[in-house]
Structures are given as structure tokens and as C-alpha cells.
């Protein structure tokens, strides 16, 4: 799905101020309330906008260590059974299937380095996990972001 400049402006506005209502968005964007509502509904229906929940900082919850764990798994039944089991570990924030020497990549958090060992031990206990390797993140100079993609929407040329 492609988005246009109005969609991009609406997404950027809601990303900057997620608590804005449709009426305020319409006022700031200079378009009718119905236009904003229709655009928003379409962006949600097509999966462009996936949520409005609060972004929660693991650090603010006491999880000061972030690590990336790669795994080699027994692929008898594919990735899904292992990913399903990993989803039951609260410190596993996301799981990706990957190419290369490993099969899965997880972003995990822990309270301390010693606590990270506990989290990795739980991962290793998951049926189907053969081997893990972990890397501790020291800093996040560029956090997860998608707004540069939205801002990169080509402008239409009108004649």
C-alpha cells in the first residue's frame, strides 16, 4: 500500500502527539474531520498503523540490560513451536526468523548481567533450542523508528 502526503502528515502528527483526537488532527492538518477519520480508518484497516498504545521503557521498569540472542534450533516442526515457547518468557521482547548461521534472533531484557544469565538459561531450556549466542547492547544511539520511512513518501507533482 502506498500512502500520500496527507497520510504521512497524519501519521507524523499522531506519532508526535498520540493523544490527539480526530477533531484536533483535522484542525492542525487543515482538512475536514471526516477526511481525517476516513484516512485513519483506512490506515488501520490496511495495517499501516498498528497501534496507539503507550511506548513503555524497559529501563524505567528496571530492565537495564538489553541483549540480542541468536539461536540454532531443531527444525523438525519449523520455527513456530520454538517461537511460541519463547513468547512465554516475559523478558523476550521480540523474536525474528533470520538467515545465516542461526535460525532465530531475539531481543531480550534483564535487570542485570547476572539476571541476563537467568534469562538465557530459560531460553536454552526451551525444547528445540540447540545453541545460543548473545550480544549485550551498550547503548542505543538510534532507537527503533519508522517515521523516516513515512517522511520519505514521494510528493505528487501536480500540473
Image (tube, rainbow, N blue to C red):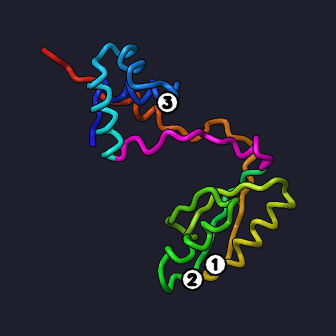
The dot on residue 74 is 2
Vertical order, 120 against 15 (above or below): below
**Location of residue 34 by image quarter:** top left
Q: Quadrant of the C terminus?
A: top left
Q: Earlier in the sequence, mark 1 or mark 3?
A: 3
Q: Quadrant of residue 158?
A: top left
Question: Helix or strand or loop: what does disc 3 sit on?
Answer: helix
Q: Position of residue 12 (x, y in %)?
A: 44, 27
Say the numbered circle drawn on residue 129: 1
> At 28% across and 18% down in the image, what residue appears?
32
The residue beneath circle 3 is 15
The label on residue 13 is: none
**Residue 40 placement: quadrant:** top left
Report helix, strand or loop for mark 1: strand
Task: Tell me: 86 left or right of 25.
Answer: right
Residue 135 vertical placement versus 56 (above, below): below
- Does label 2 or label 3 sit earlier along the sequence? 3
Q: Earlier in the sequence, mark 2 or mark 1?
A: 2
Q: Residue 150 in the image: x percent, y percent? A: 40, 32
Q: Which residues are magenta?
A: 47-64
- Residue 156 x %, y %: 22, 23
Amino acid at each position: 500500500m502506498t500512502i500520500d502526503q496527507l497520510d504521512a502528515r497524519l501519521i507524523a502528527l499522531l506519532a508526535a502527539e498520540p493523544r490527539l483526537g480526530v477533531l484536533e488532527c483535522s484542525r492542525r492538518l487543515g482538512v475536514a474531520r471526516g477526511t481525517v477519520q476516513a484516512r485513519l480508518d483506512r490506515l488501520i484497516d490496511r495495517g499501516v498503523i498498528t497501534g496507539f498504545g503507550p511506548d513503555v521503557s524497559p529501563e524505567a521498569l528496571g530492565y537495564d540490560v538489553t541483549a540480542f540472542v541468536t539461536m540454532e534450533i531443531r527444525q523438525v516442526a519449523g520455527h513456530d513451536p520454538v517461537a511460541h515457547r519463547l513468547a512465554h518468557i516475559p523478558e523476550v521482547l521480540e523474536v525474528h526468523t533470520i538467515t545465516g548461521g542461526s535460525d532465530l534472533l531475539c531481543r531480550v531484557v534483564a535487570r542485570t548481567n547476572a539476571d541476563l544469565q537467568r534469562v538465557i538459561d530459560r531460553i536454552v531450556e526451551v525444547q528445540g533450542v540447540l545453541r545460543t549466542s548473545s550480544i549485550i547492547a551498550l547503548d542505543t544511539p538510534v532507537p527503533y523508528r519508522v517515521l523516516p520511512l513515512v517522511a520519505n513518501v514521494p510528493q505528487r507533482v501536480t500540473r
